[in-house]
Image (cartoon, grey):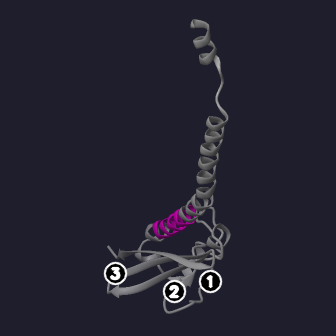
Amino acid sequence: MNTMRAVRLRRGFSLVESLMAVFLVAMCAMVVSATMPMANRSRLKADLSSKAVGMAQKQLEAVRGLGYANLTPSQLFARSMIDSTTPVASDTYSFTNVDSAALDNPARILPSGTGQLKVEQVDLDLRRVTVSVAWSENGNNRSFQIGTLVANL
C-alpha cells in the first residue's frame, strides 16, 4: 500500500493542468504585449514635452541674463538668440533655427518644432518676455509657453 502511494506522488502533471498553465502564461503575455505600444506612445509624448519645456526655460533664462537694456531685436540677434531682426508678429521673433551651443534648436530637437520669443514693453521700465515652443506630435499640434518680467533696475 505504501508503494502505491509513492507511485501516485511521483506522477507528473496532468494534461489539463499543463494546458491551464500554458493558457495563463499566454494570457499574461497578451496583456503585456498589448500595453507596450501605449506605454511607448506615452513615453515619447512625455519626452517631447520635457524637451520643449527645457528649451523654453533655457531660452528664457538666457534672455533674463541679458538684462533689460539688451532686450532689443538687434542685441538678441547679435547673441544668436533669434533667427532675424524681422518680427514674425507684433514684437514676436522666431528662434526656430538658432544654433548656439548654449541654446537648443527647436527645429532639430522636436518634430516640426518652432520657437518664438515675444518682448513687450509693459511699463516705462518693465518688459514682458514670453517664450513659446510648438511642435507636431502624431498629427496633433502641441505647445508650451512660459514668461517672465524683466525690469530696468
Q: Name the residue under label 2.
A: 92
Question: Residue type at mark 1?
Answer: Ser
Query: Of marks 1 and 3, which one's residue comes earlier in the chain?
Result: 1
Residue closest to the eye, 45 or 20: 20
**Disc marking residue 84:** 1
Specify the quadrant of the image occupied by residue 108.
bottom right
Distance from disc 2 to disc 3, alpha carbons, whole Å, reads 17 Å
Q: Are marks 2 and 3 in contact (CB under 8 Å)?
A: no
For the stretch drawn in magenta, the main secondary structure is helix
Residue type at tag 3: Leu
- Residue extending farthest to the front is 1
Which sits in the foreground, 53 or 94?
Answer: 53
Which residue shows up at 51% across the image and 76% down it? 143
Position of 4 with respect to 152 (left or right) is right
Task: Give the SS element for disc 1.
Answer: loop
Q: What element does badge 2 sit on?
A: strand
Residue closest to the eye, 129 or 35 = 35
- The residue located at (65%, 21%) in the rendering is 11
Q: Which residue lies furthest to the top in this view?
A: 2
Q: Is residue 43 left or right of residue 99?
A: left
> Does the magenta run of residues contain 57?
yes
Closer to us: mark 2 or mark 1? Answer: 2
Q: Which of marks 2 and 3 is in front?
A: 2
Q: Mark 3 points at which residue?
A: 126
